[in-house]
Image: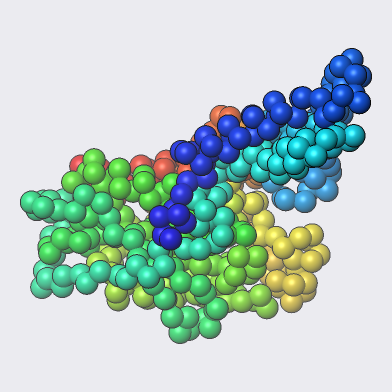
Amino acid sequence: MDGLLETSVIDGPLVVGLSTAGALALLASLWRPSRRWSRGRWSLTVLGATAGGALLGWLGGWLAFDVLDAFGVSPTTVTRSWIAAGGAAIALALVGLIRARPWRIVVGAIALVLAVAVPAMWINIDFGEYPTIASVLRISRFHGHRLPTLAQPATRPSIAEWTAPAGLATAGAVSEVEIPATVSGFPARPAVVYLPPAALADDAPLLPVWIVLSGQPGSPEDPLTAAGLLARLDAYAAAHQGLAPIVVAADQLGSPDANPMCVDGPLGNSASYLTVDVVHWIETRLPATTDHARWAIGGMSQGGTCASQLGPAHPDLFGGFVDASGELVPSVGSVDDTVARGFDGDRSAYLAATPLAILAANAPLTGMIAVLGVGEQDTRFRDGIEQLAAAAQAAGATTTLAVWPNTAHDATAWGLTLGRGLDVLGAAWGLDR
């Protein structure tokens, strides 16, 4: 069962098989449903249905994304094209059911299902949010993975002094853990912890820490899985004698669709959970450095907004933050709705919780590392990320800004930004040796 749940839906046999079935169904849809259709009339119908369906699909995508803002993101041209292709395929499958013979009705019904499934699959491939069947079903691939028993040496070498022992693990250990909300009372879901190979050694050094956060809707493990950070961490460790940061993918939401906006308020004490409860658990349970200049917080989309709030707001806890396509302001809708629901109607509290205000209030942030990234085609979030990068630079943070070509608000841009953050932070923390 686990093997089936881990089946990739972004590459491999399932993608090839479903795409092939879709192509065959499309070819079958071009066949005349019955002899009651003349060849000329059927050819004109196919052309009209294909063109009309593609146009309706494109307009539907424009209406959903650009007019109604139903998803709160900007899609790539690839996604828009697949929506149009899906519209054309649906229209072609539907007209094939008119005056059709029984076998043709069966073929048309199958073609109709595939006309929805195949474009949806390729849109997900472009967006990258759901890499496996388990992620589609929101089942954690790390459920039941216990935190390994770690050595407790009397003294630990520094990172500079540490030498990888023979037989060191070739990959990190990933575990699902419950982090008690002792102070905050926040209803957090289980976190996911990545321990690099160096942390598993008997003489493990005290390692830097990176707290990472999902988007919304999302699950705590999303930065590691959907954004591909797990593979990047193992690759980084393999290139650097088993060294990489300890990564804790914590829950800042409480449930997939909730958004307490990383503040303490009516929607939950998310900020205290992350900055008090999670920090305390890491300090007492993991081989983490006590030098918080070598701690960072990062996230993607809504989690990126959180990182740009909590990192600069707590320079005593975090020496860096990584914002992958975050919003310019915390939001649960309009400004009025956000103020009413998240801040008990206190507009001044809302304004003080925006990343720009936090950066200005905590300047100078000398020694803070800021890494921000966004997709080139992310028309909704790009301007905000560029504003935040300029503000971080003005506040004194050592700032890196990346705009990724051929991406929008998607897991590709998030993964590239988190990867850049890993490289920048790793170098600053002395892990890149």
Q: How is the image coloured?
A: rainbow
At 65% across and 51% down in the image, what residue appears? 328
Q: Is residue 259 above or below residue 393?
A: below
At 81% across and 25% down in the image, what residue appears? 32
Residue 365 in view:
no
Q: Is residue 79 above or below residue 313?
A: above
Identify the image quadrant of residue 117. top right
At 41% across and 76% down in the image, what residue appears? 178
Q: Is residue 17 above or below residue 347?
A: above
Quadrant location, the C terminus: top left
Residue 384 on image: x %, y %: 65, 45
Residue 320 on image: x %, y %: 42, 54
- Of all residues, the one furthest to the top in this rendering is 40
Residue 128 in view:
yes
For the residue pair 222 and 4, the one nearer the viewer reads as 4
For the residue pair 422 and 229, the one nearer the viewer reads as 229
At 67% across and 56% down in the image, what residue appears? 329
For the residue pair 390 and 378, the one nearer the viewer reads as 378
Residue 267 on image: x %, y %: 66, 75
Quadrant location, the N terminus: bottom left
Residue 338 on image: x %, y %: 74, 66
Q: Looking at the image, how many numbered discs can be counted on the residues?
A: 0
Identify the image quadrant of residue 159. bottom left
